[in-house]
Amino acid sequence: MTRVMAVGVFDLLHTGHLHYLEQAKKLGDHLTVVVAHDDTVRKRKHEPITGHDLRSRMVAGLKPVDVAVIGNPPDIPIFDILPIVKPDVIALGYDQDHAEAAIKEALMERGYTDIEVTRVKGLSDDLDGTRKIISRIIEMWNSEDSVEEV
C-alpha cells in the first residue's frame, strides 16, 4: 500500500483544495492530510479564518481523504509528524511555496531516503485559492455598496 501525505491550511475550503487532494490521492492508496495548526498558520501566513479543529473536520469529510490530522505547532519540527503518518509520497499543491529540492534534501538529512516528493498539477479555475475568493467577495461587496449609494 502506498501512503500519500498532503499538507495545507485549508482555510475556506474551495475547489482548489479539492483538486489538490484528488490529485494527491491518485498518487497512492491511502491519503493522510495534515491540516496546519492554528499557531503555525499565524506564524507563517495569517490569522486563520476557521480553527484547525473545524478545518480538519471539513477536510476529513472530503471523498479523497482517508485521514485528516492536525499538524504540529510551530515550536515542534515539521518533520516530527513523519513517524506518525509514515508517508511513501509527499504531495505538494501546485501553488504551495514549498521548494521540492529543499524538502528532499531535509528528508535525506533525516534518513528518510525512500519518501518521494512530488508537486500536483493546478486547477485552471479563477476561484481556486482562498485569497482569490476573498478578493472576489470584497470586490462584490464594494460594488454593491457603490450601487446602493447611487
Image (spheres, helix red, strand yellow):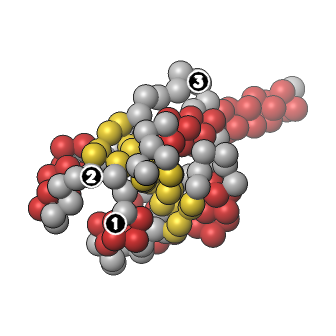
Instruction: Kindly identify the residue that appears in the image at 41 percent across and 49 percent down.
Output: 2
Q: How far apart are marks 2 and 3 (CA)?
A: 30 Å
Q: Nearer the viewer, residue 30 or 149?
A: 30
Residue identified by numbered label 2: 115
At a point 43% along the width and 39% down the height, the residue shown is: 27
Per the image, the residue denoted by label 1 is: 82
| Disc 1 element | helix
At numbered mark 2, what does the secondary structure look like: helix, strand or loop? loop
Q: Which label number is shown at residue 30?
A: none
Relative placement, left or right, of 25 versus 102 is right
Q: Circle 3 — which element?
A: loop
Q: Are marks 1 and 2 in contact (CB under 8 Å)?
A: yes
Position in image of residue 122 (x %, y %): 47, 28
Q: Which amino acid does label 3 sit on?
A: Asp
Q: How crowded is mark 3: few (under 14 residues within 10 Å), some or many (20 or more)?
A: few
The span from disc 3 to disc 1 (Cα, nearest Å) is 32 Å
Q: In this view, does 149 lie to the left or right of 53?
A: right
The residue sitting at 27% across, 46% down in the picture is: 116
Rendered residue at 14%/52% (across/down): 105
Tell me if residue 35 comes above or below residue 105 in the rendering. Answer: below
- Residue type at the position of mark 1: Leu
The amino acid on which the numbered mark 2 sits, given as a three-letter code, is Ile
Front tag of 2 and 3: 2
Q: Name the residue under label 3.
A: 125
Q: Position of residue 8 (x, y in %)?
A: 47, 53
